[in-house]
Image (cartoon, grey):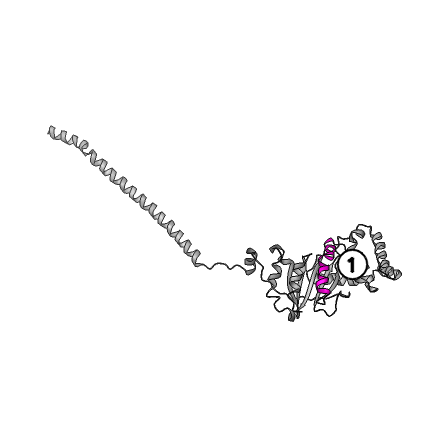
Amino acid sequence: MAAKKGKEEAMPGAGAPAAVKAGGSAAEEKRTITISKEALYAIAIVFLLMASLIVILILPKPSVPAAQVVAQTPQGPQQVQVPSVVVGFGDLPPLGNPGAPVSLIEFTDFQCAYCAKFHSGVEQAIIADYVNTSKVKFYHRDLPLGFHDKAYDAAIAAQCANEQGKFWEMRDTLMGGQQEWSILLQQDAGARFESYASGLGMNSTRFDACYGNRTYASGIKDDENAAAALGISATPTFAIVIPKSMAPALESNFSSVRALLPVSLYATVRLAQDGGDYVVIVEGSQPYPVFKAIFDKVNY
């Protein structure tokens, strides 16, 4: 019996490996469960990503407005729209043949340096090539800018010269002598305008009365209102009026005019219409080829 008991006491030692084995099975089972959860998380993440991708592909994409597309890709001349405007010619006589089919209207400021530069350069070329050949008649409208202290007085002087049939002569004198009178005090500039009138053969008493009374102030105001109606606020700016019947390809080929300018300046040359006429607005002292490209679209 003692021997048997000894064997029984020895059993726990012999059974130790069995206990360890049982413990190992439990750990493996726990590790198996943990791996299964991680796999489920991974599967769930993949599923969510795939679902999100499917939603992105299926949902309609927001459309981009045409204007935005044009603005984002300014690689070439843009297609223009043709709004309607109303153009007037003012009260001053045109330079050139009154029967010329195309009208060039300049809104100008006598004290504007860019206007004087245009007058001595591009304007003379236009007069030689188009006004003197009875293709274009040239109109002047006043737009004296507020920060030019003698521009309004000069406009009055030119209007008073027109009263005696000397508008264009006075205009040339004022533009050509801009640096001379623009640096004077206002009172001295007025005396200089009176001397110009006398030099051009005008009746000095009549001119002085007209200039002193601001007789044609309302005409200048009308020109300013006309400029505002056309969206014009800078000088020089031009409105070129062309009968549609004489330039049927102008609208479809207008991009060729803008192509002469950098993309950033496309907005300075715009196309409008006034009834049966095209109206090309040219803002700024643009180079001669821009005007030539417009005039040459006309079937004279």
Quarter of image, res 291: bottom right
- Which residue ends up furthest to the left in the rendered image? 1
- Image quarter hosting the N terminus: top left
Q: Does the magenta stretch include residue 117?
A: yes
Q: Position of residue 125 (x, y in %)?
A: 71, 60
Q: Using the image as rendered, state which of residue 298 and residue 225 is in the foreground.
A: 298
Q: Position of residue 273 (x, y in %)?
A: 65, 67
Q: Could you tell me what secondary structure mostly forms the magenta stretch?
A: helix
Mark 1 residue type: Asp
Magenta-highlighted residues: 113-133
Q: Residue at x 74, y 53 (%)?
A: 113
Q: Which residue is drawn at 78% across and 63% down?
A: 219
Depicted 286 relative to depicted 275: above or below? above
Whether residue 56 is visible to the viewer of this picture, yes or no, is yes
| Residue holding disc 1 | 172
- Which residue ends up furthest to the top in the rendered image? 2
Q: Residue at x 80, y 51 (%)?
A: 180
- Image quarter hosting the C terminus: bottom right
Quarter of image, res 72: bottom right
Q: Is residue 229 left or right of residue 151?
A: left
Whether residue 151 is visible to the viewer of this picture, yes or no, is no
Q: Is residue 186 left or right of residue 281?
A: right
Q: Judging from the image, what secondary structure is the residue with disc 1 in? A: helix
Q: Position of residue 11 (x, y in %)?
A: 17, 32
How many dots with numbers? Answer: 1
Q: Where is residue 166 in the image (x, y as percent from the top left)?
A: 82, 63
